[in-house]
Amino acid sequence: MGSTGRLFTRLATLGVTSEDDEDERLAKAVVTLFACLISSLAVIWVVTYLAIGQPLAAAIPFSYQVVSVLSLIAFARSKRLAPFRTSQLVLMLVLPFLLQLSLGGFASSSGVILWAISAPVGASLFAGAGRPIAWFLAYGALVIVAGVIQPLLPAPDPPVPQGVIVTFSVMNILGVSVTLFAVLRFFVRERDVERAKSERLLLNVLPRPIAARLRDGDTTIAERFDEVTVLFADIVDFTSMSAGASPDEVVGLLDELFTRFDELAERHGLEKIKTIGDAYMVAGGLPVPRDDHAEAVAEMALEMIASLAQRVDGLPLRIRIGIDTGPVVAGVIGRRKFIYDLWGDTVNTASRMESNGVPGSIQVTERTYRSLCERYRFEERGTIAVKGKGEVPTWILVGRVDVSEPSRGSMMEQS
């Protein structure tokens, strides 16, 4: 970053505090840059008007510079946006009008009142600055007043040279254009940066198709899926392991482990639903249906077990995994802290498969077993008692079927 970029960055953060939200930060940055740009350009007007013998005209942009510098100092100390913002808008609106009057009207002032358009434009960009339409109406009213009293204004003494009038006409048009373009460009760029951050955060919470629907105005998202595969994983004895650990160690351990799982879910095209304490939930076949959802979840489960062969944070860990396949209802709940979640017997049964499972293994229901038995090896565990369902037959997923050997499902059919 060059020296100009560093200067812009320092100015943009002049009145920013750690408590400011993104809108407040952007508003503070824009109004600060606006004030600095106009104050810098005002030097040309001050020097030129003094050179042609117009001290009153020179005093007006100079007074803007003085007030702006003082308000910037106060803003840097107080961090309060409202008084700084209001003072800048008033100065931007009124002083060009006064400068035009002091020079005798539109022609001799080179239409300097055009600078007053900065007020309604600024009000549109500065968060909380009031209604931009009101500022625009005030700007329009001043232009009309300037036109009405034009015949009553005395000619400047000494007269403004024609060359200065032409030069300043060009400078006023270019100055306003450059200032507004620079500030608008900065605003749009920063807004796009914040929008990208918000997009990433939203996609960390919601599946991409669901996030798109919310952005499009869909306020109620609820769907039924006839067949998906749900996986629950839980760290064995995590409560006792974390009892003597510091908060940083506990969070660091879970972060490292769940980051591995997130990468696996993304690699296999699965949807992470949520984490609950030290439990991890993922599903396949939603929000976009796919035929190989059970296989994708099985692949992830096997890789989750294998990934723990590499110790996490130096600790030997084991997990229990439970899987079930069947229908679910999925949707978004909440308005401020929303979540995409699943409901139904399939979800409850997958959770029971995990909680009643064997440490270091992947326990699945009969529905999942029948979906996978042609391509994966299983060990029959037998029936287990599941709350609310009674005796449920279960299998342990061991690995993939060796293509050189007949599958377990084929052998069952032959027998």
Image (cartoon, rainbow, N blue to C red):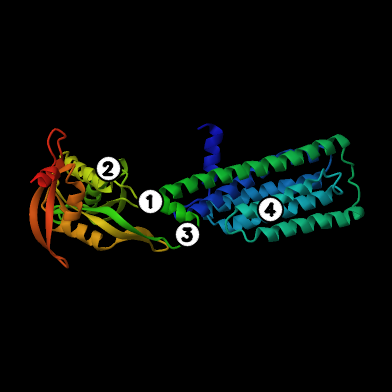
Tell me the kind of residue under disc 3.
Asp
Taking the image as shown, residue 380 lies to the left or right of residue 195, namely left
On the image, numbered disc 3 is attached to which residue?
218
Cα–Cα gap, marks 3 and 2 = 30 Å
First reached walking from the N terminus: tag 3 or tag 1: 1
- Residue 373 in picture, x, y percent from top left: 16, 46
For image coordinates 7% across by 55% down, the residue present is 382
Tag 4 secondary structure: helix
Which is nearer the N-term, disc 3 or disc 4? 4
Report which residue position mark 2 lands on. 264
Amino acid type at mark 1: Pro
Helix, strand or loop status at disc 3: loop
121 sits left or right of 8 in the view: right
Camera-side mark, 2 or 4: 2
Mark 3 neighbour density, 10 Å: few (under 14) some (14–19) many (20 or more): few
Q: Earlier in the sequence, mark 2 or mark 4?
A: 4
Q: Is mark 1 on a helix, strand or loop?
A: loop
Mark 4: give few (<14), some (14-19) or many (20+) Cα within 10 Å: many
**Residue 398: image location, x then y, percent:** 13, 44
**Disc number placed over residue 137 in the picture, else none:** none
Q: Nearer the viewer, residue 257 or 155?
A: 257
N-terminal label among 2 and 1: 1
Residue matched to label 1: 207
